[in-house]
């Protein structure tokens, strides 16, 4: 996202898409789903509806991307970051609870309203922080600290949502029995997918010019243009 700010047009769009994939898929969604694989109910077998699970990932990537484009192609006014953060937060919330809806089990579920609302608030704060961090934070130390803050915020939002979950014995009236796969069936493709996407993103970032190199090149072109005009 930092690199996107030094580009214009299609190049900026490309970096924003890369950032949305990194944050939305390999960051937020992967953390959420791996944590969901650790969710158990004694004596119950939990499986996962595949289309709903995949839809939750696509939604969070798309919504994180929308928030980034609002900020990435706008000025630095605070309302843009806040608007983008609200969109990202609501998208993360939809992903979170859609992922829970993907659970297939012989029980009915409900949610605690106060904890549900708290999870939404945490998601919006985390989304706003992510956009602000990507827009302003520079340097290795600051980036590491920002990553730690984001990790705690996203994990906190997830487990607040889990704490809001209430499970009652017996299926919900009229609820269809959807097919699902076990957590173990998801684990290998999930780990391979995360590894592959992370590798591709790391290669793209490492071979691309750094922020300092982009800035120095822009300054050189400006000086060269001034000399040519003389």
Image (cartoon, rainbow, N blue to C red):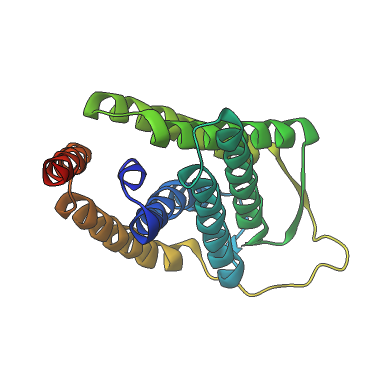
> Residue 102: percent from the left, percent from the top?
63, 62
Residue 81 location, quadrant:
top right
> Residue 123: percent from the left, percent from the top?
59, 37
> Residue 191: percent from the left, percent from the top?
34, 59
Residue 38 seen by the camera: no
User: Dividing the image into 4 quarters, which one contains the N terminus?
Assistant: top left
Which residue is most to the front?
230
Answer left or right for 76 relative to 187.
Answer: right
Query: Toward the viewer: 13 or 171?
Result: 13
Query: Toward the viewer: 58 or 66?
Result: 66
Is 36 above or below relative to 54?
above
Residue 172 location, quadrant:
bottom right
Residue in view at x 47 percent, y 36 percent: 130
Answer left or right for 87 relative to 37.
Answer: right
Answer left or right for 101 relative to 19.
Answer: right
Query: Toward the viewer: 67 or 59?
Result: 67
Residue in view at x 35 percent, y 54 percent: 15
> Residue 184: percent from the left, percent from the top?
43, 63
Residue in view at x 67 percent, y 58 percent: 101
Residue 128 seen by the camera: yes
Count the marks.
Answer: 0
Which residue is most to the right?
173
Residue in view at x 47 percent, y 31 percent: 132
Is 226 above or below relative to 12?
above
User: Dividing the image into 4 quarters, which one contains the C terminus?
Assistant: top left
Query: Toward the viewer: 130 or 49?
Result: 130
């Amino acid at each position: 996202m930092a690199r996107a700010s030094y580009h214009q047009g299609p190049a900026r769009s490309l970096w924003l898409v890369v950032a949305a994939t990194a944050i939305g898929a390999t960051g937020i969604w992967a953390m959420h789903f791996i944590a969901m694989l650790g969710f158990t109910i004694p004596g119950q077998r939990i499986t996962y509806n595949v289309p709903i699970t995949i839809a939750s990932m696509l939604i969070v990537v798309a919504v994180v991307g929308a928030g980034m484009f609002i900020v990435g192609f706008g000025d630095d006014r605070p309302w843009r970051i806040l608007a983008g953060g609200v969109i990202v937060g609501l998208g993360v919330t939809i992903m979170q609870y859609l992922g829970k809806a993907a659970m297939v089990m012989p029980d009915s579920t409900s949610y605690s309203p106060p904890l549900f609302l708290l999870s939404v608030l945490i998601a919006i704060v985390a989304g706003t922080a992510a956009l602000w961090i990507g827009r302003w934070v520079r340097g290795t130390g600051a980036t590491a600290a920002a990553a730690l803050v984001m990790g705690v915020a996203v994990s906190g939002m997830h487990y607040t949502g889990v704490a809001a979950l209430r499970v009652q014995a017996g299926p919900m009236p009229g609820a269809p029995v959807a097919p699902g796969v076990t957590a173990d069936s998801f684990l290998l493709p999930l780990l391979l997918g995360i590894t592959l996407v992370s590798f591709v993103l790391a290669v793209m970032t490492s071979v691309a010019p750094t922020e300092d190199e982009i800035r120095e090149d822009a300054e050189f072109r400006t000086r060269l243009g001034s000399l040519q005009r003389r």
